[in-house]
Every structure is written in structure tokens, then in C-alpha cells.
Amino acid sequence: MTIKKLTDILTDFQSTLYYYRHKNWQEVSPKNFILAVNRIANHLQNIGLKKGGLVGIMAPSSPQWLMMDFAIQKCGGVSVPLFHNMSTEHMAYILKQTKMQILFTEDGPTAKKIQDNYKLKSVIPFWEKNKNQTSLQNIIQNGDEKVTPSTTTEKDIVTIIYTSGSTGYPKGVMLTHSNLTSQIRATKQLFPLSEKDVALSFLPLAHVFERMVMSYYLSQGIPIYFNDHMDRLKDHLSVVRPTLMTTVPRFLEKIYKKSFTALDKQSSIKRFIGSFALKSASKNQNPLSHFIFDKIVYKKIRQKFGGNLRMLISGGAALSADIEKFFNNVGLQIYQGYGLTESSPVVSANYPRHNKPGTCGLPFPDVHVKTEKDNELLVKGPNIMHGYYKNEKATKDTIKNGWLKTGDLATIDKDGYIKLIGRKKESFKTSTGKYVVPVPIEQLLQKSKYVDYCLVIAEGKPYVSCLLFINEEYHDEENLKPKIKEYIKQINTQLDHWEKVRNFKIIKRILTIEAGDITPSMKIRRYVIENKYKKEIQGLYDKA
């Protein structure tokens, strides 16, 4: 079946979907999924949704999220995903710019709060509803299936996805049906699936990476389980035993650190063997030592992921090479990719038989890449966005002669593999004239079990310093500052003299999405943190 529009996926829909509710897995059969999509579409048309109309979806990922998205598409509407835990400031900005009148959200109280504050025409909760509200559940159970066909074409806008806003207010990326379907076709070429595959989804569908991958899964008819909360992911992995998962580096970094901290509870002998095995997993191993460590340690790590995982696809940010090597050596195959919301999202990826650790892989089929003199990566292809919503200037500044200016610095090796250097706007020039790229340094710092997030400071400064946000479980750790000082001393041996961290500030506060500290994809919002901690940053240089 040729997929030209996302709604073509519904033509031969075969995926069974599962979600966790009332302490049990609930099943949605292919037949019931299509029935629900049609009933939601009917309701949307009855309340006035026309072709090109904007509809918001602000809720955690689930089969119901997908039902709403497809229903909006069947009406010719445009979905606007909103992260359910986004900051109030960003939500207000998006609602004001789009002027949307219809919004789906998770529950009755949230729906009432949004309706009271923003006066939308219709706010529809998923489940429990307040008085005078219509819930999605009621629509699915009691609605009419009749839908008036829309005149949508593959060139029409299907969604507006707002960027995470790590450097300012979010911009609405307009993507067409053809943008996303080109990605589905390319993914099928590189990552073929089988009837034995089972996917577990825990990333937000409001993020284009998970949404595109989900469209691909659905086009291949495989079963999908939706994890409803990170606290339950460990249990769900052991029950679902997936073969496929998509993830972000932040999640892998946490697993990496927990693998080491879990040894603290072991006996001295087990702690010694386990520590040696884990440390060697980040290095090249000989077959004999790998065989021994696999039997004793690595097999247990694989079991925590269910024991059946054959592909763990990482995107959203760069993953450090030694952590990638760690997971590959323990038998969890990482395929690292790279992309942006503006490219729908995948630009490049490692894939079976073409995997070069430490890189973001080869360009996707039909995607072309090149670098400018300053190493900025440019991208051209059928996946490049239509433009930014109500922002022609930003569109013209970002797309030049059909090439998307990514804002990322990269190199392309002789085999065509892309390796990221850092963000163009995040290459800091110190007051001594030296350039410092913060991301590799931050990756090293965040490998410490004590450090949850960190922010490297260098722009216009005489030397490099950093803010260290400490993991909550170590807020009461004795001699914390000397321990971190010793860790930084070790890190500095791996850095050039102008990159070495000369000073640091420990901060015992949890960064959250709701407070606007980090993006929904778990990346630190640099300018926000710099503004919040101006006094602390200045203190790092008072004696300079």
C-alpha cells in the first residue's frame, strides 16, 4: 500500500493498541480504533470543524491521542499537539497565536480551567467530565460514524508542532502530509519490521519523533503498548517485553548511572566484579572477558528491558560515544539518529548493518546534507517543513534556496556519516578569545551519579565554570563538594586547557518542565537557567 496521506494508514489498519488504566492493560482492537476515529470525526464536524481548522491535543500519549489525531485529519483539520506538562507561559502563547477554538485534554478539571481562562468554543476531556461537558469517552461510545469526506491532498498542512523553545518562545512548525509520509517510506527501507515485533511507547506523541515513528508502526500493523507514567516503565518493560523502543539520550544516561549506583547495595565481591564489568562495557573488549561479564552482569541489564529488545533508537540530542558503546556491549543495540521538528524529523540515522557509534548515521533516503564553511549543517529533501506558522521572517531566515539551516555544527566523514559538534549559537567565545563547545563538557559532567543537570558557562568569561543541579537522592550527601571537585579534576584531564572547568556552583533544586527549566524532550533551556541564576553565575567570577 502506497501511503501519500497519513489517513491512508487507516485503509488497512491492523495494529492492536494497549493502554494502562485502572491497574490493567486495556485493549483497543483495529475495528474499534477505526470506529472511534469516525465517531470523533463526526463530532468535530458537527461542532463546526472545517478543512484547515486548528484543533489542539493536550494529553499524555495513548491510543486515544492517536484516535483524535486521525479524526482531525479525516475532517481536513490541522492538529496542534501541546505537551500536557508544558509551562503555562508557553501554552498561553500558543493558544493566543493559533486562536484555536477546539481542544482535547486529559480530564474534566483541566478542561474547565482552560475553558475558564481562554474561552475556547469546545474543550473536550478524555475521561471524567464535569457538569455540562462532553467527554471523549461518551463520543466514542455513543457517537455517529458518518463522516463527510474532506478534500485534503498530500500537500496540505496536517499538523503544526511547536518547537521546544530551548532558546526562546516556541515556533509553530507547519508540516504537510507528504513531509511525514516521506519519512514513513524512508523508515521502512532502513528499519524493516516483522509480525513478531512489539513496540513500547513512552515518549510524548506531542514530539514529532515519537509521532512519526508511531505512524510507521501503525502502517506496518504491529501491536503497540503505551506506558502511561515513567514510574511504571520498569514494570511495564518486564510485562510487555518489547522488541522495539524509541528513546532520548537523557533516559539512557539515567539508566547508565543507575547501573553503577545499584552496585552500592551489593556485597564487596559482587560490587568489585560488577564495577569492573560495567566500566569495561564503555571500552573495547576481548571476546573472553565479554563472555564472562555477559553471563554475570550484562544479561541482568537486558532483562530489565524485558529481554527481547532488538532495537533501541535514540534521537532528540547527541548521545555520548562511551555511553552508546556501553549499551551496545551489554547487548542493547543502540541506533542513534539526528533530526529536527523542521525536518519531520529525521535527517540521518544509524541502522542495521550501517552503524557507526559516535555518529548520527547516514542521511535518510532522499535527504541531502552539506556543511557550510563554519560547519553549520544544511538539509534538503521532501521532509523539510512548509514553514513557521505566522512567521514569514523566521521561515526565510531558516530556509535558503530550499536548504534548511539547522543551526547545528557537524562534520561529515568520508563514508557519509554525520557527527554533531554542537549548536551554532552555543559555541562560546571566552574573554581570552578561545572557543568552547559546552555540550561535550556537560555530557562528561552529567555522567557523575550526583549530577542531574548541568550548565556550562563560558561566553565572554575568563574561564569555564558550571552550575551543577544535584540529583535529589544526594541532596544530603556528606562531603558532596569535595567529591564533585575530585570528579571535575578527573574530567579536566580529558579537556584542552581553555576548556577545563575552573569553578562550579552546587544547586540543590530539581529542574522541571512545568517551571520552564527544561524542554518536554528533557533538554535544559539555557537562557532560562542563565536568567534565573544570574547572581550565582556572577559569583563564580567575583574573584577572577
Image: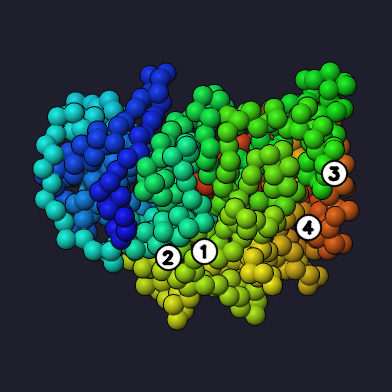
Depth check, mark 2 against mark 4: the one in front is 2
User: Which of the 4 image quadrants contains residue 64?
Assistant: top left
Between discs 2 and 3, the one toward the N terminus: 3
Between discs 4 and 3, the one toward the N terminus: 3
**For the residues marked 2 and 4, what is the alpha-carbon distance in whole angstroms?**
38 Å
**For the residues marked 3 and 1, what is the alpha-carbon distance in whole angstroms?**
33 Å
State the residue in front, 436 or 241: 241
Q: Residues within 10 Å of mark 3 (few under 14, many from 20)?
A: few
Q: Residues within 10 Å of mark 2 (few under 14, many from 20)?
A: many
State the residue in front, 290 or 364: 290
Mark 4 sits on what residue? Answer: 464
In the depicted structure, whether residue 40 falls above or below residue 473: below
Is 99 on the left-hand or right-hand side of 201? left
Residue type at the position of mark 1: Phe
Measured as percent of width and height from the top left, residue 154 is found at: 28, 64
Depth check, mark 1 against mark 2: the one in front is 1
Mark 1 sits on what residue? Answer: 364
Mark 3 sits on what residue? Answer: 286
Is 456 on the left-hand or right-hand side of 229? right
User: Which of the 4 image quadrants contains residue 59?
Assistant: top left
**Secondary structure at numbered mark 1:** loop
Asked if the residues shown at circle 1 and circle 2 are in contact, with their CB atoms under 8 angstroms apart, the answer is yes
Residue type at the position of mark 3: Asn
Residue type at the position of mark 2: Asn
Is 130 on the left-hand or right-hand side of 443? left
Between discs 2 and 4, the one toward the N terminus: 2
Mark 2 sits on what residue? Answer: 383
**For the residues marked 1 and 2, what is the alpha-carbon distance in whole angstroms?**
10 Å
Is 141 on the left-hand or right-hand side of 322? left
In the depicted structure, whether residue 254 falls above or below residue 239: below
Depth check, mark 4 against mark 3: the one in front is 3
Between discs 3 and 1, the one toward the N terminus: 3
